[in-house]
Image (spheres, grey):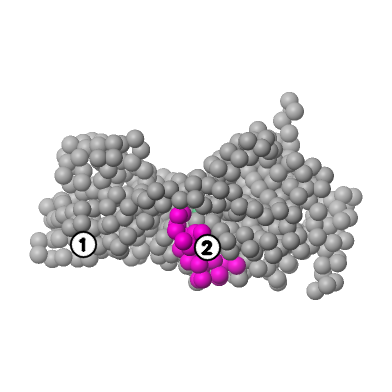
């Protein structure tokens, strides 16, 4: 083991002259380190199984802050600190109940309240249901939905190969469905879970009433895909059926929470900051091992590997574990706010928030010159079957960063199974494969290293 570390230090220190071949050697070393001695899987086991679900404002979210801070401190980084941020505090309350009333036949179906939803009256709501496929269809129905439950049932499109595309195409039903239906006097909304397969898990997620007056807020819930299929089928034979649901969620006052930050200070241009991160909060139905426990521990692994190899970064490498991505984005916004106050200069940000599956590439937000530059690294990643370098959304937490010269990337793991788990009660530690998680961490370490070594291309005017 000692021999490996010594060789590593030699390879890394002798970087400049034989750049290409040293890059290959160093990347090989990062993958070896990740696959043989990484801590990310053990960290995730603790975060998932000992701490559990980490919705913003919950005691377990606070525990996760302390745990990750302690673990970062144990790595011997140059700085580890907490950054205060006020976060929303929504609680689910009692487990929801729901059933279809088809004449005298009562069939229970799995639902979960959507984030920021209001409760139903204590006795629940019973009403007729109108099924729609889109907000456009709702608008055409207009006043016809008054007094009824609007049921959004447009499935995620199975034809897209990138499942995140299907998620964004179907997402409006969940995000603004309740707000839009309330305008026409609907008494509640149900939305088909954003899940490509048929199963019994309702999938949580945030929604917003926008600028609707509070008195007009209506309760909204997600229904499992099997539940949605059954409801739709039963509606065809009995359009007058009734649906009952009861939920007791509420929004409490905001709570003080934290982003967790660790730093390896740059040795050449410490004023240039590179961020690597994920989000520490999760939904409340499970421990969020994929979303985003994986991204948190992979980001921690990046700095662990670099520190362990005694790597001296040119730029400051900062691991940021953002709070409150799921239901507010306050952590990302606060990080940017503080960074602006301090006049910090970010050159690069890498986020992992697409699950802990086999890494396939990066989703890149950059101008053409920098996109080309990152694409130039593709050959170095091909031996690891990481080859998908595309332009696209990099990550919700780093979305807030606005430094003029910043280049952003998101780790892109294989996305085929992600929405089987996303925001649902089965997003648990046993859904994580150790090697896949480690390969992701090595992939991230390699990109951070390459950008640190080679910098980014500044616009011509600079
Ligand atoms: Zn996430």
User: Label 1 belongs to which residue?
Assistant: 99
Q: Is residue 59 magenta?
A: yes
Say what secondary structure mark 2 lies in.
helix
Dot 1 or dot 2, earlier in sequence: 2
Query: Among all residues in the image, which is located at the extreme top?
Result: 461
Which residue does the image show at 80% across and 57% down from the upper left? 311
| As drawn, 28 above or below 278 | below
Q: Residue 56, percent across and down?
A: 46, 54
Split into 4 quadrants, where in the image is the N terminus? bottom right
Locate residue 329 relative to residue 229 in the image: left or right. right
Asked whether the viewer can see residue 178, the reply is yes
**Which picture quadrant has residue 305?**
bottom right
Which range of residues does the magenta coloring cover? 43-62
Q: Is residue 236 magenta?
A: no
Q: Residue 166, percent across and down?
A: 43, 49
Looking at the image, which is closer to me, 253 or 421? 253
Locate residue 362 relative to residue 454 in the image: left or right. left
Say what secondary structure mark 1 lies in.
strand
User: Label 2 belongs to which residue?
Assistant: 63
Chief SS of the magenta region: helix
């Amino acid at each position: 083991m000692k021999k490996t570390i010594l060789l590593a230090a030699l390879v890394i220190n002798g970087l400049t002259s034989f750049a290409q071949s040293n890059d290959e050697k160093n990347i090989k070393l990062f993958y070896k380190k990740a696959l043989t001695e990484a801590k990310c899987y053990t960290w995730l086991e603790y975060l998932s199984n000992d701490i559990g679900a980490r919705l913003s404002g919950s005691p377990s979210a606070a525990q996760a802050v302390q745990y990750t801070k302690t673990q970062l401190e144990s790595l011997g980084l140059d700085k580890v600190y907490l950054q205060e941020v006020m976060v929303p505090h929504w609680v689910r309350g009692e487990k929801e109940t729901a059933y279809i009333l088809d004449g005298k036949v009562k069939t229970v179906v799995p639902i979960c309240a959507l984030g920021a939803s209001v409760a139903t009256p204590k006795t629940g709501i019973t009403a007729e249901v109108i099924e729609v496929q889109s907000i456009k269809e709702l608008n055409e129905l207009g006043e016809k939905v008054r007094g009824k439950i609007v049921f959004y049932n447009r499935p995620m499109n199975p034809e897209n190969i990138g499942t995140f595309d299907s998620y964004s195409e179907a997402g409006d039903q969940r995000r603004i469905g309740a707000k839009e239906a309330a305008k026409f006097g609907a008494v509640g909304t149900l939305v088909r879970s954003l899940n490509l397969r048929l199963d019994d898990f309702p999938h949580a997620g945030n929604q917003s009433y926008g600028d609707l007056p509070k008195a007009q807020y209506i309760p909204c819930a997600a229904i499992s895909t099997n539940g949605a299929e059954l409801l739709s089928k039963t509606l065809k034979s009995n359009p007058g059926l009734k649906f009952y649901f009861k939920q007791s969620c509420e929004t409490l006052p905001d709570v003080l929470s934290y982003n967790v930050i660790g730093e390896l200070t740059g040795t050449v241009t410490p004023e240039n900051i590179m961020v690597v991160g994920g989000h520490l909060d999760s939904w409340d139905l499970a421990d969020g091992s994929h979303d985003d426990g994986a991204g948190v521990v992979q980001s921690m692994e990046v700095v662990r590997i670099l520190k362990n190899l005694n790597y001296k970064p040119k730029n400051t490498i900062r691991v940021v574990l953002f709070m409150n991505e799921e239901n507010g984005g306050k952590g990302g916004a606060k990080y940017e706010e503080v960074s602006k106050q301090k006049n910090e200069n970010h050159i690069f940000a890498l986020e992992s928030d697409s699950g802990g599956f086999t890494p396939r590439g990066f989703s890149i937000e950059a101008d053409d010159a920098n996109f080309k530059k990152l694409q130039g690294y593709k050959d170095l990643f091909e031996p690891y079957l990481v080859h998908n370098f595309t332009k696209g959304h990099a990550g919700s937490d780093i979305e807030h960063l606005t430094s003029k010269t910043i280049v952003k990337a998101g780790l892109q793991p294989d996305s085929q199974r992600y929405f089987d788990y996303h925001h649902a009660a089965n997003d648990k530690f046993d859904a994580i494969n150790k090697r896949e998680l480690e390969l992701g961490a090595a992939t991230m370490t390699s990109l951070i290293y390459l950008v640190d070594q080679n910098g980014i291309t500044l616009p011509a005017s600079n």
